[in-house]
Amino acid sequence: MRGLLLVLVVTIVLVLLNFLLPALINPYLFQILILCGINVILAVSLNLVNGFTGQFSIGHAGFMAIGGYTSAALTYYLGPHVLGKAASIGLSPAIVGTSFFVLSVVVGGLASAVAGFLVGLPSLRLRGDYLAIVTLGFGEIIRVIILNVNAVGGARGFADIPRYTNLFWVSFFAFVTILVVRNITTSTHGRAFISVREDEIAAEALGINTTHYKVLAFAIGAFFAGVAGGLFGHYLMYLHTNSFTFMKSFEVVIMVVLGGMGSITGSVIAAGFLTILPEALRPVKEFRMVIYASLLIFLMIARPQGLLGMRELSLQTFRSLPFRPGKKRTEGAQSG
């Protein structure tokens, strides 16, 4: 009951923010906020593959592209027919359009999950650098295939995608991604994921089906990358393969490594930090990338295990902080 009440309160707050924030902040800051949410989905989903299961995938942009183009094609080609049918029987076009958008984003995620399954299967015999090369090659193959499909714009890019993405839907899917990954990693299945990461041979000796869990991690990670791609396309109203190059995959990997391999809250913090940092450095645009790279190098020297390592932030973490005023009063009363 408390969980349901919490979800209801969070939903109401998100709906209010979705209406109030566009009026309070300028469109540029609002777009950065939206991109932060999309990057959170990408970083947390990749952390399930790289951080919790110990595989090394750098093809996340490929899965994002599959989801983005699939969901955009659905709303672009089928959306007008669905809205026309809905209007003919008296249904609200806004409600039907939004429902069809959510469905298209989920279908885009499922298409990416199928791709993740297909990539995961032949990659089972590969580890480390070799697996990274396979996933990198997969991402580039997807990008080149899309470049040659005229139905989704080809080299011109896919324009006139209807805008359905807003702060509410980005926050909603980011919340679902965190909830799903958190529940998986704290369950029995999560222990199996972690055992594969720690020692695959020992995990097999204990009867854990490592093949199943490695492919499952790939499919779940790819699903949420596809969802992020769908949200991305329906916010910018335009997709081009230049947004899904290997540099985008590296960007997500950096978020996971900087936040901490195996830390969901670390991925959330790093995704927000690395989305805002390049924008904050725009006033010094001549030295922007130099400062950006230098900060990353400094952070990785100071915290090679990532900002949070494998730790998670929670309310209990803040309650245990030594400088918390309430704690000082309690300690003072106990000593007195």
Image (cartoon, grey):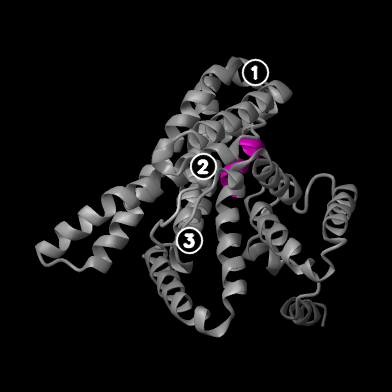
The spot of residue 295 in percent (x, y) is 86, 56
The circle drawn on residue 126 is 1
- Left or right, 96 with respect to 74, comes to left
Task: Give the image quarter of residue 124.
Answer: top right
28 vs 41, nearest the viewer:
28
Helix or strand or loop: what does disc 2 sit on? helix
Which residue position holds label 2? 65
Q: Is residue 274 magenta?
A: no
| Label at residue 167 | none
Q: Work out which quarter of the rendered image holds the C terminus and state it.
A: bottom right
Going 57% across and 75% down the picture, which residue do you hit?
Answer: 27
Viewer can see residue 216: no
Q: Position of residue 223 (x, y in %)?
A: 46, 41
**Residue 240 spot, x, y in % from top left:** 54, 47
- Residues rendered magenta in the picture: 44-52
Q: Nearer the viewer, residue 243 or 148?
A: 148
Q: Nearer the viewer, residue 147 or 289?
A: 147
Viewer-side label of 1, 3: 3
Q: Amino acid at mark 3?
A: Tyr
Amino acid type, residue under disc 1 in the picture: Leu
Callout 2 crowding tier (Cα within 10 Å): few <14, some 14–19, many ≥20: many
Residue kind at label 2, given as amino acid type: Ala
Q: Which residue is mark 3?
A: 235
Q: Is residue 327 above or below residue 40?
A: below
Instruction: Answer left or right for 148 relative to 307.
Output: left
Q: Is residue 240 above or below residue 91?
A: above
